[in-house]
Image (cartoon, rainbow, N blue to C red):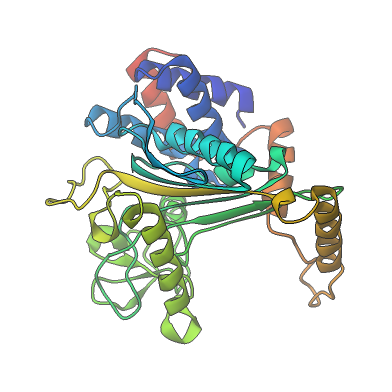
């Protein structure tokens, strides 16, 4: 187990050695570690070495000039200047919140960014202002559309955070693929097989091999196959791709730059970098915030009291498992798999810092 503060300080040091300004390094570390705290181990410090490799390859600008390139009173398009998505997305969400303060809702589409960590972090930024937060991003093309063998879409997550009163907030954070690629990476580290319905071979056959992507296979959309609703996952991923990238001027579909530095960026790109889409909705633009939050409590309590299938524990509210995990890990520390520890030790040696 590693104490949260220890990993946070180490991660910040790595970003500082990449050349990030102090404020950006701290923010990036906090966003990245939020994934580990919430139990989304695939998107936390396990990815730190990946950001370093992208920076070494010249694909991440450690000192970006993040700026608005187009706006209206309630919308904006932001150019991330190839910065860390861990920094670009929170800055964009702050703009969305400022727009919402003035106009009731704020919407920001982002181009020329990079991987932004967990979507939930950015959506949850709205909660402290009695706003509903929405965050989504496109990602490396690893997912095949329904009926295809081609990798055309990312795992393209969607997150929605809704404030409540006495109850914890509602926080839905989900990939639009059957499973995020990071879950395959965890299975690879643990030397375990993948469940059926997550991936397919390069010929479109079902597979349980977590290394299938290296042989030309593809992740499957949410639903896994047409009979179980993969067309819905495909549609949701497409919506994320369009709002994040076609709308902003980022790369979309099969042209999204891969997260891994050893894969080449496609030729004849239609846009710039990776795209995000963030929204903030001021609750009192629709009804009094206190009234709304009381009814959110009622909604949450009603669902918690739903009859349970025997042997299944209890009905959970989106965000419950992550919140409980965060409470535990803040006290007990964050567990790291041995391959992740080795990665961090390599970074420590690379930059001459202490893990």
Side of 324 relative to 233 (left or right) = right
Q: Nearer the viewer, residue 177 or 73?
A: 73
Q: Position of residue 133 (x, y in %)?
A: 61, 48
Horizontal side, residue 105 vs residue 259: left or right: right
Q: Quadrant of residue 84?
A: top left
- Rendered residue at 29%/29% (across/down): 55
At 21% from the left and 42% from the top, the residue drawn is: 262
Quick check: 157 above or below 152? above
Asked whether the viewer can see residue 38, the reply is: no
In which quadrant of the rendered image does the N terminus lie?
top right
Q: Residue at x 74, y 46 (%)?
A: 324
Tag count: 0
Residue 339's place in the image compared with 350, above or below, is: below
Q: Is residue 226 above or below residue 255?
A: below
Image spot of residue 106 (x, y percent): 55, 46
**Residue 355 at what x, y percent from top left?**
49, 20
The x, y position of residue 231, in whole percent, is 42, 78
Residue 172 occupies which quadrant of the picture? bottom right
């Amino acid at each position: 187990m590693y104490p949260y503060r220890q990993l946070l300080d180490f991660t910040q040091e790595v970003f500082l050695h990449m050349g990030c300004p102090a404020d950006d390094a701290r923010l990036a570390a906090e966003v990245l570690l939020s994934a580990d705290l919430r139990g989304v181990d695939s998107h936390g410090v396990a990815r730190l070495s990946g950001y370093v490799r992208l920076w070494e390859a010249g694909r991440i600008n450690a000192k970006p000039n993040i700026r608005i390139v187009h706006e209206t009173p309630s919308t904006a398009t932001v150019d991330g200047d190839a910065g860390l998505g861990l920094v670009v997305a929170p800055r964009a969400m702050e703009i969305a919140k400022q727009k919402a303060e003035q106009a009731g809702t704020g919407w920001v589409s982002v181009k020329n960014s990079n991987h932004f960590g967990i979507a939930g972090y950015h959506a949850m930024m709205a909660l402290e202002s009695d706003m509903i937060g929405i965050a989504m991003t496109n990602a490396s093309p690893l997912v095949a559309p329904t009926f295809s063998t081609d990798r055309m879409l990312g795992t393209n997550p969607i997150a929605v955070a809704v404030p409540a009163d006495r109850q914890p907030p509602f926080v839905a954070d989900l990939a639009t693929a059957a499973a995020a690629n990071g879950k395959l990476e965890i299975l690879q580290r643990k030397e375990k097989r993948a469940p059926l319905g997550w991936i397919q071979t390069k010929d479109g056959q079902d597979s349980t091999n977590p290394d299938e992507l290296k042989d030309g296979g593809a992740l499957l959309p949410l639903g896994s196959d047409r009979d179980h609703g993969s067309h819905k996952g495909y549609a949701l991923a497409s919506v994320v791709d369009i709002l994040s990238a076609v709308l902003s001027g980022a790369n979309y579909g099969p042209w999204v730059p891969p997260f891994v530095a050893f894969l080449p960026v496609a030729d004849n790109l239609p846009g710039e970098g990776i795209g995000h889409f963030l929204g903030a909705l001021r609750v009192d633009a629709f009804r009094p915030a206190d009234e709304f939050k009381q009814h959110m409590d009622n909604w949450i309590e009603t669902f918690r009291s739903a009859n349970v299938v025997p042997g299944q524990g209890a009905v959970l509210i989106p965000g419950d498992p992550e919140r409980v995990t965060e409470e535990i890990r803040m006290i007990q520390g964050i567990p790291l798999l041995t391959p992740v520890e080795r990665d961090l030790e390599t970074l420590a040696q690379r930059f001459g810092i202490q893990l």
